Amino acid sequence: MGHILIAEDDDAMRNFLARSLERAGHEVVAVGSGTEALPHIASEQFDLLLTDIVMPGMDGLALAKRAAILAPGMKVVFITGFAAVALNHGDEPVTAEARVLSKPFHLKDVVAAIDELTAA
């Protein structure tokens, strides 16, 4: 199973995702912001970043761009309540290996997307 970093500013959602993914067999580190996630990305090797797009401070898109520099092989799954959010800032794509799950989502969809990406 994968080593996953969760960046989600909503405490309840972050805790729910962390517990659920741990139960599915993944090793999880969960933080409350993009800025909290960066030191983990710089010091640990993760298979996947699961991040909310809309967060105060550093949003999930900016985090994914920084993660692509620090850990180019890490895959990304975005979660958002804003289905119309674009995944491009300017002309450069955030990451080639990204999925987007719109809230509300079913836990099985999150686990299936993460299992598929971490198995690849």
Image (tube, rainbow, N blue to C red):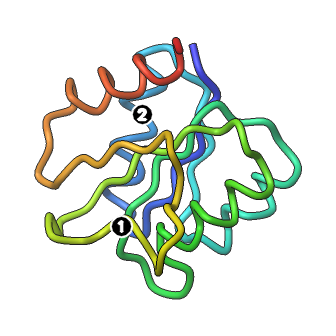
User: How many numbered marks have been drawn onto this rendered protein structure?
Assistant: 2
Residue 47 x %, y %: 64, 31
- In the picture of the structure, the residue carrying the numbered disc 2 is 19
Residue 105: image quadrant is top left
Residue occupying image coordinates x 37% and y 41%: 17
- Seen in the picture, residue 89 relative to 117 is either above or below; the reply is below
Residue occupying image coordinates x 42% and y 77%: 55
Residue 65 x %, y %: 61, 65
Classed neighbour count for the residue bearing mark 1: other residues with Cα under 10 Å, few (<14), some (14–19), many (≥20): some
Name the one closer to the observer, 74 or 91: 91
The quarter of the picture where the N terminus appears is top right
- In the picture of the structure, the residue carrying the numbered disc 1 is 10
Calculate the distance from the C-alpha at mark 1 to the C-alpha at mark 2: 14 Å
Residue occupying image coordinates x 55% and y 71%: 33
Residue 101 x %, y %: 24, 47
Q: Secondary structure at mark 1?
A: loop
Residue 88 x %, y %: 41, 69
Q: Which mark is residue 75?
A: none
- Seen in the picture, residue 91 relative to 26 is either above or below; the reply is below
Outermost residue, front side: 91
Amino acid residing under circle 1: Asp
Of pointers 1 and 2, the one earlier in the residue sequence: 1
Residue occupying image coordinates x 61% and y 26%: 27
